[in-house]
Amino acid sequence: MKKDTIYIFLIPSLIGFLIFFLIPFVGSLYYAYNVDGRFSLYNFVNTLQNEAFQLALKNTLLFLLICVPLNMILPLLVAIAVKSIGEQSRLFRLAYISPLVVPVASVAIFWSIRFAPGGTVGRMLGILGIPEIDFLHSGWAVFVVALIYLWKNLGYMMVLYLAGLSEVPGSYYESASMDGAGAIQTFRKITLPCLRPTIFFVLVMSVVNCFKVFREMFLITGAYPDESVYMLQHYMNNMFRSTDYGRLTSAAFIITAIITIFLIFMFRLNHRAQRRLGR
């Protein structure tokens, strides 16, 4: 009877998985590999040779190289600083977490006002005698988007690091202090090794969240932004609007393959590191 009850509760989830994941996945396979009623890799070859896709892929990889390391280092430094404050750090934690609950439209309006021509940043530059820069429609746009990404994700990653730091036994630091270890040695030999699982999780989440910044970017810069911030999400959105499902699905599978290979590589590195640490 208990097994039957479990199956009853699983049915809604299975139906949702079937409707929203499995059936669309099978349909996307059809659009990706079907060309004039026959199996072909034309859509994949055509997508890889497309200049817009190449630009979007290059910009996305560059955005990852800029944002992922910063999103791993800055929250760690903030978490260490917040943890050192102790019980009085609640206000700081709230301030860093608050961007997570701000609606996307509000985020777009806030940053548009700051970086639009004649906005807050432009006026500050004018006071300093620096000519006004159109941040949102020039090569500076990628740095604006990176700033939005870090601002929105720093609090969440900080909480993850705080959870990891709370698991480090205090006796380790006491032993290191008695042995005369400095702050840098303690950080390298104790904090970083104990935070290895947390760092790995933050890395994965940072990569995933890079693909979620499209909403703010789209609201601020539109469907056809400056070339420096034309990402894979823009390319796929434009293919969807033009009903070019062949290129859309083939691009989706190429992106999925890249992310999957990256995650497999990182999981293997993490597994090897854990084995060495265990020894």
Image: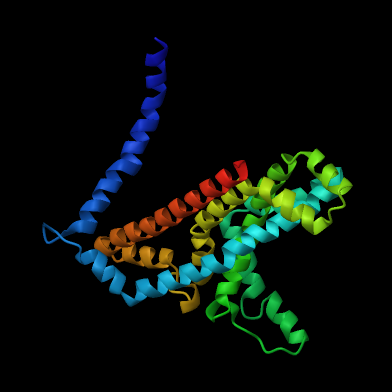
The spot of residue 196 in percent (x, y) is: 63, 48
Q: Nearer the viewer, residue 278 or 15?
A: 278
Q: How many marks?
A: 0
Question: Residue at 51% across / 52% down in the picture?
Answer: 269
Q: Nearer the viewer, residue 205 or 218?
A: 205
Does the rendering let one see residue 226?
Answer: no
Question: Residue at 62% across / 60% down in the picture?
Answer: 71
> Which scheme is used to colour this image of the protein?
rainbow
The spot of residue 261 in percent (x, y) is: 40, 56
The spot of residue 61 in percent (x, y) is: 47, 68
**Residue lying farthest to the front in this orientation:** 279
Q: Nearer the viewer, residue 20 or 199?
A: 199
**Residue lying farthest to the left in this orientation:** 37
Q: Nearer the viewer, residue 246 or 177?
A: 177
Q: Quadrant of the C terminus?
A: top right
The spot of residue 50 in percent (x, y) is: 30, 74
In this rendering, would 249 be left or right of 114? left
Q: Quadrant of the N terminus?
A: top left
Does the rendering let one see residue 29?
Answer: yes
Question: Residue at 36% across / 71% down in the picture?
Answer: 53
In this rendering, would 62 be left or right of 21? right
Decide: is 18 above or below 58. Answer: above
Question: Residue at 29% across / 47% down in the picture?
Answer: 25
Decide: is 138 above or below 155. Answer: below
